[in-house]
Image (tube, coloured by chain):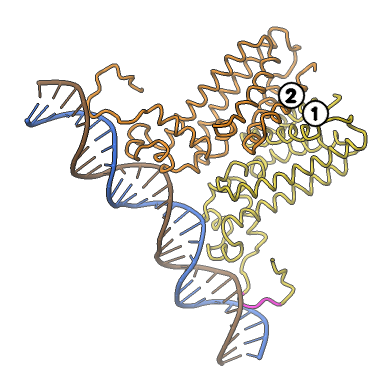
Chain colours: A orange, B yellow, C blue, D brown
Amino acid sequence: MDRVNTDKPRGRPRSFDRGRALERAMHVFWRQGYEATSVSDLTRAMGINPPSLYAAFGDKEQLYLEALGRYQQRRVESMAKWFDEEPTAKAAVRRLLTEAATELARAGAPRGSMLVLSAMQCSSDALQAKLAERRASVRAILKARIDRGLHEGELARGIDTDALVDFYSAVFQGMSLQARAGASRKRLLATAALAMRAWPGG
Amino acid sequence: MDRVNTDKPRGRPRSFDRGRALERAMHVFWRQGYEATSVSDLTRAMGINPPSLYAAFGDKEQLYLEALGRYQQRRVESMAKWFDEEPTAKAAVRRLLTEAATELARAGAPRGSMLVLSAMQCSSDALQAKLAERRASVRAILKARIDRGLHEGELARGIDTDALVDFYSAVFQGMSLQARAGASRKRLLATAALAMRAWPGG
DNA sequence: CACATTCCGTAACGATTGCTACACATGTAA
DNA sequence: TTACATGTGTAGCAATCGTTACGGAATGTG
């Protein structure tokens, strides 16, 4: 529903960069979570006043969902690339976890995955339901890659790929929390390496 | 500094059961987190009015810490028992994860570990620091049990027990988040079983 | 120029937040 | 009974919450 400005815009033009403002909002939400971020935190970080925020983004919840959407889009693109580059499901999962170790502990960005952290940083039931959908969509990408390994014969028939997805998702979520608590990239890599020992068939 | 009431109490006696009220507060905090729980949520659940809450527990933060302390104490006691009953470090870790699968998905209680969830449900830096200490103390118990296995020759010399502790902590944290998201006991058990495949030496 | 349209900044709305002043109730001690 | 000490309930504090009404500023169109 976003008009992409092919028509000539009428009225006073917006005096700030919408994308840049969204990026700033994303970082604030990522660092503090939905509930703990106030609209005045947002307006301060975005460099605009409340009416501009509401005109451009709807309300706090819509802004959060759009910010999370931007975060999720990038993560999904990265995952798709990694999964495509790696020849096997096992290598793909290893790649996911090792890249995660670097991303989750990156300096200059909030620690941990915004998507994982969002799970508990908000209490609205309506919002929680939407967040669950988004997490499910990321989970589905991982499951698709592992199932592909199954169909290609990399994994023995009868392997419970849902259980594998649960396990590696849990490891990723745990790494996310540990990154949040200050764990170094090196320690996250060690956890990722141990997790790969659980892959079927060694 | 709590006087244990061996002396005769003077003045009007408290008209509610402090322990029962604390228990109710614990459940509310556990379900909703620190930030998302308002004092009026607490007073409603505890069946008392704000002045009674403040007189008996200090303020919202102290009440949270005391409620979390009660939760933590029980968890620590359980862990100590399990770790003492199991003959090896590997069996102890397996026991921890399988018991966790049951506890985290127990009906009638909030899903997930209150201690794990607390990591991101509050934004005060001062509070975060105290929560980090508590998580560290639980982590230390696990590390002590694994190190015991090392000293008893169960684990090969040179094994990085810190890495093992990181890994199994991450798995526990991930299971906690998945329990929160609705994962069944059965699926949590499957994750626990996969995690045990990463134990050194199979 | 006027006009319509859209955005910006100020300023404030009602609701809720964590917390407490105050008057009264209820207990022990003299 | 009187004095003291403590808890309870009402009622409301200042601050902040998410949100918006309003008037003026900036643009395109006639």
Front one among D22 and B132: B132
Residue range (magenta): B8-12
Q: Is residue B108 visible?
A: no
Q: Is residue B77 visible?
A: yes
Judged by depth in the image, the label closer to the viewer, 1 or 2, is 2
- Residue C4 percent across, percent down from the top left: 16, 29
Q: Is residue B9 magenta?
A: yes
- At mark 1, the secondary structure is helix
Residue B194 relative to residue A2: left or right: right
Q: Is residue B10 magenta?
A: yes
- Residue B2 percent across, percent down from the top left: 69, 66
- Residue B37 percent across, percent down from the top left: 54, 49
Vertical comparison of A131 with B31: above or below:
above
Q: Residue at x 60, y 50 (%)?
A: B127
Front one among A126 and B5: B5
Residue B109 relative to residue B85: left or right: left
Residue labelled with disc 1 = B196
Q: Residue at x 88, y 43 (%)?
A: B85
Q: Does mark 2 fall on the same chain as mark 1? A: no
Chain bearing tag 2 is A
Chain bearing tag 1 is B
Residue A193: mark? 2
Give the amino acid type for the residue marked by disc 2 in the picture.
Ala
Q: Quadrant of residue A18?
A: top left
